[in-house]
Image: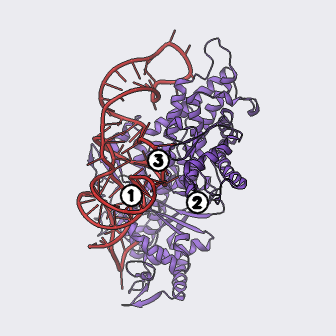
Amino acid sequence: MTPEQLADVVRAAVSAAVARGTLAVEVPDDVVVERPRNPEHGDYATNVALRLAKAAGRPPREVAELLAAELRATGGISRVDVAGPGFLNITLAKAALGQIAVQAVTADAAYGRTDVLAGQRINLEFVSANPTGPVHIGSTRWAAVGDALGRLLSASGAEVTREYYFNDAGAQIDRFARSLQAAAKGRPVPEDGYAGAYIDDIAAQVVAAEPGLLERPDAEQLEIFRRRGVELMFAEIRGSLAEFGVVFDVYFSERTLHESGALEKAIARLREQGHVYESDGAVWLRTTDFGDDKDRVLVKSDGEPTYFAADCAYYLNKRERGFDKVVIMLGADHHGYIGRYKALVAAAGDDPDEHLEILIGQLVNLVRNGEPVRMSKRAGTVVILADLVEAVGADAARYALARASVDQQIDLDLDLWSRQSNDNPVFYVQYAHARISSLLRNAGDLGLTLGAATDVDVSLLAHPRESDLLRAIGEFPRVLSGAAELRAPHRVARYLEELAGTYHRFYDSCRVLPLGDEEATPLTTARLWLCAATAVVLRNGLAVLGVHAPERM
RNA sequence: GCGCCCGUAGCUCAGUGGAUAGAGCAGGUGCCUUCUAAGCACUUGGUCGCAGGUUCGAUCCCUGCCGGGCGCGCCA
């Protein structure tokens, strides 16, 4: 019996008491059971009596006693105690608890998937680094977290499109093109330009691909440097992301918005809604009507549209493509944009709380030898995704970035990470999986298999360490759905560390395979199922984080 | 000045109103002739920044203050 099933049983007990007339309350639809910290408090506990006491007009413990009587008459439950102020502590029958292992193994890759977000069409935008340089460390965090969140939302039943928006129009790209041109001609880096080996590299590639380029008219040169440069830079970005295990469904070019007339259309729509005005020769959106600090310019007095105008067009484009939830992940240095984004959604006539979700993540600080590393392009100390992967490997990098809450700044110690030791919890989790894989291989060598689900007696899993492990495995679906709803992939990582620890403790006190000349027993088979179930959860959980579950280490 | 995030063990951090606040690392003591010791057991370590408030119950919610980070452009 999984905790979800038990929660249903508890709710049924409330209904039964109400039907019997012993309890006069409205049956709550959000009954939950939780895993008590203290093992003396049973397998699961619920506070439902405490919550119903006031409505029932009776002391919590009295309500608890009523419900305990109902629950004791239910199959699969071996014991119910009323404790403390009115908690119900429930102990499952061993067979019911053991069934969790069978369910996990049977469901295999589907174990943990739920439908809590079914029916939602979500557009998840993250990274979206402009193709003027390699993906830096900050964006790498969003690559790890965003990708994990995408997998998490999918696992919870949502229909997810991962999207990468890139700016290939406007002044920033012009500066990029001028920087390439300068590098190709051996001239110094232009004002506000980009510098670095990658600029020289790309410039050389563009010149090689376009013979006679430097003899052509200046405007023509710049156009070619722009187009070819963006192409090459973007290929590099996609390559490094792919190496990191992150692939997007859609790579969306800002330029296409300009070329399709989407900006004009968006401004026209906002104007129709009555929120656009002109002042000082510029076109403005009255975002202050919707809680923003100040109004925002859509078209500058020189006639050029702002980046924000493109944002408006882009948002409307996503809505036109049928997404009912637009999720954008941004760094903390962009948190000031929430106000204007929310306002634009409201100005377009949508509900800013329903249709737009902006996730803000704090910045990553780099530390080396205990000293903060100042990021400087000129000093060449900028750290990029590819460097990080080279230093610690994609698995450790992804795991470490995804295991912290996005609300927390990360101090990333390059020395610690490059040591690639067990300082990093990813090894602890991966080791548990490798250990189980090895054990199952050995079992196979002995001719031992799981056999049919109907032939295993999981009620034999009665050791405290076995019960701990079963309860931990039973948590997994709730961990995934909870992490998806809270947009908190780090919860999955923390859970896996706990599960790995629970497995190691089980392994230490419960021998699985027969020793020496001993024969395999029904307990051997039950324990193999338990091990296989643990492996399933470790695999599925690591898959959510985009981290490999090795068979050997 | 205004806004967002953070403040929990020596360090890095979990903890969606519940019972005695946890993990990893670091420190100490043990455990490998049979399933992976990248492991396990025991142990050291806390005024959950401070002060009020709401609640049967607050690390969690509200208010104020202190400290740290990041923002506040007709830049992108």
Q: Position of residue A197 (x, y in %)?
A: 35, 55
Q: Is residue A38 visible?
A: yes
**Mark seen at residue A60:** none
Q: Position of residue A517 (x, y in %)?
A: 64, 11
Structural crowding at the residue carrying mark 2, measured as other residues with C-alpha within 10 Å and reported as few (<14), some (14–19) or many (≥20): few
Under tag 2, what secondary structure?
A: helix
Identify the colour of chain B in the image: red
Identify the colour of chain A in the image: purple
Residue depicted at x 47% and y 47%: A398
Give the left or right position of residue A485, taking residue B3 as reference: right
Q: Does residue A116 sit above or below A418 in this rendering?
A: below
**Mark seen at residue A398:** 3
- Mark 2 and mark 1: span between their CA atoms? 43 Å
Q: Are marks 2 and 3 in contact (CB under 8 Å)?
A: no
Structural crowding at the residue carrying mark 1, measured as other residues with C-alpha within 10 Å and reported as few (<14), some (14–19) or many (≥20): some
Q: Which residue is mark 1?
A: A362
Q: Which residue is mark 2?
A: A55
